[in-house]
């Protein structure tokens, strides 16, 4: 606050002073105080962890992701309960009341804090929440007892078990993420009923954490008994497959532009047998489950973009304060001031959207998809402008801003490209979800 204003405030009546927020608290602390107490605590915990354990590794892991040893980080995150938040206490670390009200909010706060420190390491920790989501959202108590609770419990004790999420195939990506595509998708991964369970055959590509996970939730079309061709929308079924099962092979790790700390890997299923207990939800319920998982996690993908963008703006602001040009700090130049003011304003708007989306106790398709798409676009804009502001230095790895730009570009692609997310918003325009109930207003026109 400007010192002149501080002076003038003292002249107001006490009630007048009280009615307005005059503290000089930082935006982050101010925002945190608006949250319910459990979320305030988590936000502080996530930030502390990110600053202490993620930020110091960020540049090194980005440089050489294949050589980096993230095991100590996983153990630390596991012990702090950050890898078991899909299940409620006492199995996992999510309070019961949050599971039904503020679950997505927890994940969104975690994503922003982790990714402000490093988008790649953030994703290397967050892919597990995506992998665990179908276990939770199956709503199947047997699945919770057999898989969800033991995995969360193991992670809390530091015996790390990570789960990845696999839908994408060489010839099917967007198609399985929106309704029309699903009716005609060419889907290779097929499950066949065999005595005692199922036999899975096919392959998946670009699976985040695929090379590191201990198990993967894989979606396959279940062969039909009536001889009709199996279809994604009618026959999709989810299974959990542990690493080490005969026929389950890890393939190539892709060389990525950004979020490099997290692998994106091919997975092969060569007639992998899984018993009935490995089916997640009823047979042929996978289409709804997949859509629900994506809607559940899209606000979190928006929060990843927000975190990366915030990290870049923080660096650019420090740079503008500390760098001198023509005898003055860069921040004294009006163009720089305007540019930074715009970037901070955009990150505030992104946070407002992510938090608003995360406030819904259960995800809403159009809102989740709109959040993911807009935040991914704004995140890239912010990172790019932050880089521009820093001139040559923005282009150099030690500052981390060129990395932020590479990292955030991925948010426009995964969890459905932005175009596919906008199709989900369009779908909601035909229903009351976003646009309200259809009226009769224009029927008379034409
Ligand atoms: C690094 C990385 C990590 C990933 N992690 C995972 C993961 O953990 N698990 C997983 O299952 N998948 C993962 N993916 C896959 C990702 O979700 C898909 O790549 C993404 O959904 C796009 O699918 P696609 O590659 O088949 O694109 P395509 O479907 O081939 O799309 C190509 C282009 O066409 C556009 N397009 C397609 N259909 C339409 C349409 N109907 N209308 C308008 N435009 C359209 C798309 O927007 C895109 O621009 C990851 C991908 C990457 C790159």
Image: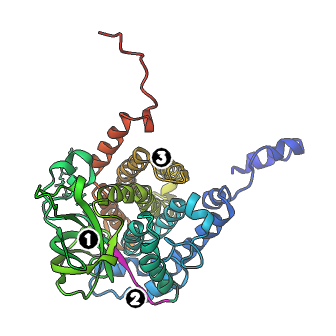
Please tell me which residue lies in front, 237 or 374: 237
The answer to whether residue 261 shows anywhere in this view is: no
Does the closest atom of ligand 1 sit within 8 Å of the Cβ of label 1?
Answer: yes
Image location (x, y in percent) of residue 35: 65, 58
Q: Main secondary structure of the magenta part?
A: loop
Q: Are marks 2 and 1 in contact (CB under 8 Å)?
A: no
- Element on which disc 3 rests: helix
Marking on residue 342 = 3
Question: Is residue 402 highlighted in magenta?
Answer: no
Estimate the spatial distance between the alpha carbons at disc 2 and disc 1, rounded to whole Å.
19 Å
Residue on which disc 1 sits: 207
- Element on which disc 1 rests: strand
Marking on residue 71 = 2
Part of the protein shown in magenta: 158-164
Quadrant of the picture in which ligand 1 is shown: bottom left
Does the closest atom of ligand 1 sit within 8 Å of the Cβ of label 2?
Answer: no
Marking on residue 341 = none
Estimate the spatial distance between the alpha carbons at disc 3 and disc 1, rounded to whole Å.
35 Å
- Does residue 354 appear left or right of residue 400 in this picture? right
- Does residue 22 appear left or right of residue 316 in this picture? right
Q: Residues within 10 Å of mark 2 (few under 14, many from 20)?
A: few
Please tell me which residue lies in front, 29 or 239: 239
Vertical comparison of 160 with 353: above or below: below
């Amino acid at each position: 606050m400007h010192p002149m204003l501080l002076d003038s405030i003292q002249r107001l009546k006490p009630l007048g002073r009280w009615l307005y927020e005059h503290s000089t608290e930082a935006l982050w602390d101010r925002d945190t105080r608006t949250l319910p107490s459990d979320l305030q605590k988590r936000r502080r915990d996530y930030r502390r962890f990110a600053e202490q354990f993620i930020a110091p590794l960020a540049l090194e892991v980005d440089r050489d992701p294949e050589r980096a040893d993230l095991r100590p980080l996983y153990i630390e995150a596991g012990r702090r309960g950050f890898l078991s938040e899909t299940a409620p206490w006492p199995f996992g670390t999510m309070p019961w009341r949050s599971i039904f009200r503020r679950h997505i909010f927890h994940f969104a706060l975690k994503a922003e804090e982790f990714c402000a420190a490093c988008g790649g390491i953030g994703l290397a920790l967050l892919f597990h929440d995506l992998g665990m989501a179908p276990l939770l959202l199956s709503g199947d108590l047997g699945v919770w007892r057999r898989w969800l609770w033991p995995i969360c419990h193991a992670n809390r004790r530091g015996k790390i078990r990570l789960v990845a999420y696999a839908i994408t195939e060489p010839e099917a990506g967007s198609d399985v993420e929106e309704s029309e595509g699903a009716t005609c998708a060419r889907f290779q991964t097929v499950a066949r009923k065999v005595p005692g369970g199922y036999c899975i055959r096919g392959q998946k590509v670009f699976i985040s954490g695929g090379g590191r996970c201990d198990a993967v939730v894989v979606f396959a079309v279940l062969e039909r008994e009536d001889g009709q061709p199996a279809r994604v929308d009618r026959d999709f079924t989810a299974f959990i497959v542990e690493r080490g099962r005969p026929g389950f092979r890890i393939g190539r790790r892709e060389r990525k532009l950004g979020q490099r700390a997290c692998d994106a890997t091919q997975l092969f299923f060569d007639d992998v047998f899984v018993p009935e207990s490995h089916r997640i939800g009823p047979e042929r319920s996978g289409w709804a489950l997949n859509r629900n998982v994506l809607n559940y996690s899209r606000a979190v993908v928006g929060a990843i973009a927000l975190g990366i963008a915030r990290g870049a703006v923080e660096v650019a602001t420090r740079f503008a304060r500390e760098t001198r040009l023509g005898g003055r700090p860069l921040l004294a130049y009006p163009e720089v001031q305007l540019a930074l003011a715009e970037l901070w304003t955009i990150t505030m708007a992104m946070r407002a959207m992510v938090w608003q989306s995360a406030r819904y106790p259960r995800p809403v398709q159009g809102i989740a998809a709109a959040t993911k798409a807009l935040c991914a676009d704004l995140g890239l804009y912010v990172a790019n402008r932050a880089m521009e502001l820093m001139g040559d230095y923005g282009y150099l790895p030690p500052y981390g801003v060129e990395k932020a730009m590479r990292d955030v570009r991925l948010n426009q692609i995964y969890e459905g490209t932005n175009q596919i997310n906008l199709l989900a918003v369009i779908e909601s325009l035909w229903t009351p979800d976003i646009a309200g109930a259809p009226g009769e207003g224009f029927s008379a026109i034409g």
